[in-house]
């Protein structure tokens, strides 16, 4: 019955163990790897004075034929006093706005992101459509608000992402919006 197990005449001449374990395991931060590869980008509105009860809205677009996935790493910004920050999927604004240039975080690579971006600041909410992903109220004392998504928000080709800051103050409020992401080929 067990003659094939215990019969040495059918055993192989030799065997070789192959260990596929590599030690120590090296784990890299995705943003660092993306920067090293020249595919990590940032954009900013800079400081914009927003009128009382007004809006600062940034729209990022991943074009239909880009062939790239946009992986949102970090969003930061805020104002000197009360502000509501909304993140919207597939919203937009019709105005031409002011275009923003994505900057490569690796100075050895060109600023060649597939993303197109623009912003607008006005007294009424310019956004249309989309779905609200998150909404945050900045404390009345103001300051920087940072959201670390580490690539958990992904923009496929043909989608938009909007960051909308609403001035909840009764006077003008300096505001800024900053976005970091990396791109991967589909």
Image (cartoon, rainbow, N blue to C red):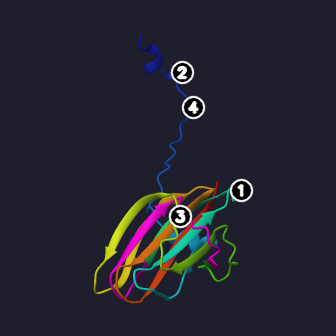
Local crowd at mark 2 within 10 Å, few (<14), some, or many (≥20)?
few
Residue picked out by circle 1: 65
Report how far apart the C-alphas of labels 4 and 1 lie in the structure: 57 Å
Numbered label attached to residue 10: 2
Cβ–Cβ under 8 Å for marks 4 and 2: no
- Locate the C terminus by quadrant: bottom right
Q: In screen coordinates, is 127 left or right of 37?
A: left
The question of residue 97 being in magenta is answered with yes
* SS for dot 3: strand
- In the foreground, 49 or 43: 49
Q: Residue at x 41, y 76 (%)?
A: 166
- In the foreground, 20 or 74: 74
Q: Nearer the viewer, mark 1 or mark 3?
A: 3
Cβ–Cβ under 8 Å for marks 4 and 3: no
Q: Earlier in the sequence, mark 1 or mark 3?
A: 1
Q: Position of residue 164 (x, y in %)?
A: 46, 72
């Amino acid at each position: 019955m067990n003659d094939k197990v215990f019969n040495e005449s059918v055993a192989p001449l030799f065997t070789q163990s192959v260990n596929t374990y590599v030690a120590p395991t090296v784990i890299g931060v995705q943003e660092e790897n993306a920067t090293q590869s020249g595919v990590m980008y940032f954009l900013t509105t800079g400081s914009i004075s927003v009128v009382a009860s007004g809006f600062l809205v940034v729209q990022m677009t991943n074009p239909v034929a880009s062939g790239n996935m946009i992986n949102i790493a970090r969003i930061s910004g805020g104002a000197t006093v009360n502000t509501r920050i909304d993140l919207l999927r597939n919203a937009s604004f019709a105005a031409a706005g002011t275009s923003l240039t994505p900057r490569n975080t690796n100075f050895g690579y060109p600023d060649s992101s597939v993303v197109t971006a623009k912003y607008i600041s006005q007294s009424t909410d310019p956004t249309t459509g989309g779905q609200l992903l998150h909404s945050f109220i900045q404390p009345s004392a103001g300051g920087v608000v940072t959201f670390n998504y580490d690539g958990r928000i992904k923009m496929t080709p043909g989608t938009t992402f909007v960051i909308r800051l609403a001035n909840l103050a009764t006077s003008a409020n300096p505001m800024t919006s900053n976005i970091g992401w990396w791109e991967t080929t589909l």
